[in-house]
Image (tube, rainbow, N blue to C red):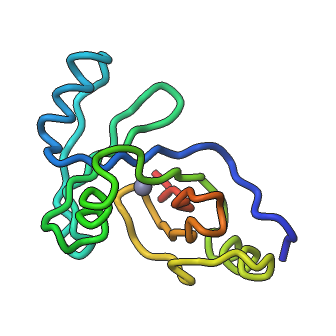
């Protein structure tokens, strides 16, 4: 096991929004970003989409109800930056490394997400940033 959690690149930046259709239309119209498919992820309580932005991506998240994680986030802090996602290789090994380093994990084991296999690291361990690890699913 390595002693550091090496990251490959910033996979995406997550943004919490109240109306994902309106937000996607805004980013397309104002920033000339490409269209993207909106996916309902019932188990995670969000409608989500990943917009290609050059070398990285923007993930829009609309809560399906106020009592979901993203719903509570918007209630407390309003719309805005929600999380930062690092792309990694061997996500399960990286989570073990982080635990060894004393980093608090929200997901001790990886799960399936919109962008691949994912796990969240607690913001209290990363300067207030909710941090997601992503291992891409091979094409
Ligand atoms: Zn994400």
Q: Nearer the viewer, residue 101 or 117?
A: 101
131 left or right of 3? Answer: left
89 left or right of 12? Answer: right
Kindly tell me whether residue 134 is visible in this rendering: no
Residue 131 location (% of width, % of height): 55, 59
Which residue ends up furthest to the front in the rendered image?
76
Q: Tell me where residue 73 sits by quadrant.
A: bottom left
Residue drawn 59% across the image and 52% down it: 86
Is residue 96 placed above or below 73 in the rendered structure? Answer: below
Residue drawn 12% across the image and 39% down it: 21
User: In what quadrant of the picture does the N terminus appear?
Assistant: bottom right
Kindly tell me whether residue 88 is visible in this rendering: yes
Is residue 109 placed above or below 12 in the rendered structure? Answer: below
Residue 97 location (% of width, % of height): 76, 75
Q: Tell me where residue 23 sits by quadrant.
A: top left
116 left or right of 31? Answer: right
Q: How many marks?
A: 0
Q: Nearer the viewer, residue 127 or 90?
A: 127
Q: Quadrant of ligand 1?
A: bottom left
């Amino acid at each position: 096991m390595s002693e550091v959690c090496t990251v490959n690149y910033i996979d995406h930046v997550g943004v919490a929004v109240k109306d994902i259709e309106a937000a996607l239309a805004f980013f397309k119209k104002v920033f000339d970003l490409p269209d993207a498919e909106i996916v309902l992820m019932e188990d995670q309580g969000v409608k989500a989409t990943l917009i290609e932005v050059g070398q990285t991506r923007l993930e829009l998240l609309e809560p399906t109800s106020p009592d979901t994680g993203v719903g509570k986030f918007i209630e407390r802090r309003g719309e805005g930056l929600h999380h930062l996602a690092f792309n990694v290789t061997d996500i399960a090994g990286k989570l073990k490394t982080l635990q060894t380093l004393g980093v608090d994990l929200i997901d001790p084991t990886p799960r399936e997400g919109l962008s691949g296999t994912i796990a969240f690291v607690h913001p209290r361990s990363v300067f207030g940033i909710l941090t997601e690890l992503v291992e891409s699913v091979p094409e």
